[in-house]
Image (cartoon, helix red, strand yellow):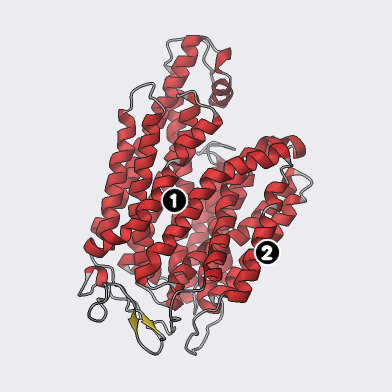
Amino acid sequence: MPAADSTDGAPDGIPAGPAGTAPGAAVSAKGPTASGTARPAGRPPTPVVVSLMLGMALVALDSTIVATAVPQIVGDLGGFSVFSWLFSGYLLAVTVTLPVYGKLSDTFGRKPVLLFGIALFLLGSLLCASAWNMAALIAFRIVQGLGGGALQGTVQTLAADLYPLAERPRIQARMSSVWATSAVAGPALGGLLASYAHWRWIFLINLPLAALALWMTTRHLTEPVRSPGRRGPVDWAGALGVFCCGGLLLFALVQGGVAWPWLSAPSLGLLGASAVLAAVVVRVERRAEEPILPGWVWRRRTIAAVNLAMGALGLLMVAPMVFMPTYAQSVLGLGPVGAGLVMSVMTLSWPVTAALSQHVYRRIGFRDSAAVGIALAAAVLCSFTLLPYPARPWQPALIMLLLGAALGLFQLPLIVGVQSTVGWAERGTTTASVLFCRQVGQSVGAALLAAVANATIAARLADAPVPGLPRHLDDVAEALEHPELLPRTAADHLREAVAAAVEHIFLGATAAAVAALLVLLLLAPRRFPVLPELRDD
């Protein structure tokens, strides 16, 4: 039964429980939950928690460790013109498979999907380490991404399955800590392995971690027993349609403005084909008995609002994660390590406020907690435009620290809240839809904000009052890397152009934050329709 979008009692319908029980504490009872699932008593054993964190670490570390080894990889395998697909191919595979794995986990259970994802990720890592040229490495990175999609969505879903609502912030904060640690340690570890061992060790290091996660999951993870019921056929046609449609759309967004102009035939053709496929997918899903992308994901106000808000989060995250390092190096004159530190301080405050957010949403509710967080994030993003030129390194670092604190308060209440509005049989699909929307928002944001940056820099170069500047955007990267080759006035003007471009990007990120705030206030119900939790004691 779909959860209603209204409820009485404590904020967001969090059950008050028996007398003396904190709001949101699990209520002891026998029998299946509203989703047909009996929850296990007590906290999950430590090995299960460790296996979940290992699974998350595989995905989180892989997204950062490869970047610093690109020069060594290109020097060994060649393929400089296509090396960006080491990241784009992986991102495509993760994103388009999230909805598929979410539905499969609701149909067959979390454990088989998680084991399949770990095994496929392990295989992809082994293949990447044995790659003989850049084309093979890109293909094997896609295999890794196919496993990473299962890991990312299923681990998040299991965290909600195994922990009662009162304790979910704790496990989610641990997951955030894994991402934060990986963001800081990944680039350093990748650089060390590439410099003192070999770039292939970047992938080989995954093998013992994946093997340990596979063994611990197999041995220790026991899912709640579902009540018997009829299992409908798997919607393989819908899965293929979602995969192809999402792949075409993301391919167009990743390559548009880079490999070809936005208004060129390839861009328009890919976007048109993805639109046609989207219409086909909608038709197929309406007829499917158990659709991969069920309509209720968008018909329920709570889930639809969280999906849109998380899409906006993915878009705004492009500003600090992609463009802040460029700003730190090109405008502030910092080295790669210093630029990485300016950006990574955001990951220090994010898990802290995420862990503390439960004290906020227990008082004012999931929606209002997230609204406070994203409103603060909008103010912090906008404050970047007030920095002096040139800024001191501690100033953007402080902005990143405050931004992480605001986003920790925004993201975790939404994830915990939306997972608590559905039962076991819908939680995998719901979690996957949220993560899918964030990934798509990130791809759209990269395309849109890169276009804003290019337009700003092109306008500044066209109106430049000084000689010696690069005439084409393609030459800007080389000029920024070697500013000493430019006349001093030209180098200063180019740095000012980059600073102006990044300011415009942060304004765009501010607009995305404001859009997320409006979505929460206008679309999301003030109280999330949280389902009561029943457990076996």
Give the percent coordinates (x, y) of residue 281.
50, 65
Residue located at (48% from left, 71% from top): 285
Estimate the spatial distance between the alpha carbons at disc 1 and disc 2, rounded to whole Å.
32 Å
Residue 432 visible in the current orientation: yes
Residue type (three-letter) at the residue carrying disc 1: Gly
Which quadrant of the structure image shows residue 150? bottom right
Work out which quarter of the rendered image holds the N terminus and state it.
bottom left
Determine the secondary structure under disc 1: helix
Q: Does residue 235 sit above or below 57 in this rendering?
A: below
Give the percent coordinates (x, y) of residue 88.
59, 47
Residue type (three-letter) at the residue carrying disc 2: Ala
Which quadrant of the structure image shows residue 297? bottom left
Work out which quarter of the rendered image holds the C terminus and state it.
bottom left
Dot 1 alpha-carbon crowd within 10 angstroms: few under 14, some 14 to 19, many 20 or more: many
Residue 309 visible in the current orientation: no
Q: Does residue 133 sit above or below 335 in this rendering?
A: below
Give the percent coordinates (x, y) of residue 172.
43, 61
Question: On the rendered structure, is 272 left or right of 368?
Answer: right
Residue located at (56% from left, 75% from top): 221
Which residue is identified by label 1?
A: 441
Mark 1 or 2 closer to N-term? Answer: 2
Residue located at (27% from left, 79% from top): 17
Q: Nearer the viewer, residue 175 or 450?
A: 175
Residue located at (30% from left, 36% from top): 382
Determine the secondary structure under disc 2: helix
Q: Are marks 1 and 2 in contact (CB under 8 Å)?
A: no
Q: Does residue 537 sit above or below 482 in this rendering?
A: below
Which residue is identified by label 2?
A: 211
Give the number of the mark in front: 1 or 2. Answer: 2
Dot 2 alpha-carbon crowd within 10 angstroms: few under 14, some 14 to 19, many 20 or more: some
Which quadrant of the structure image shows residue 411? bottom left
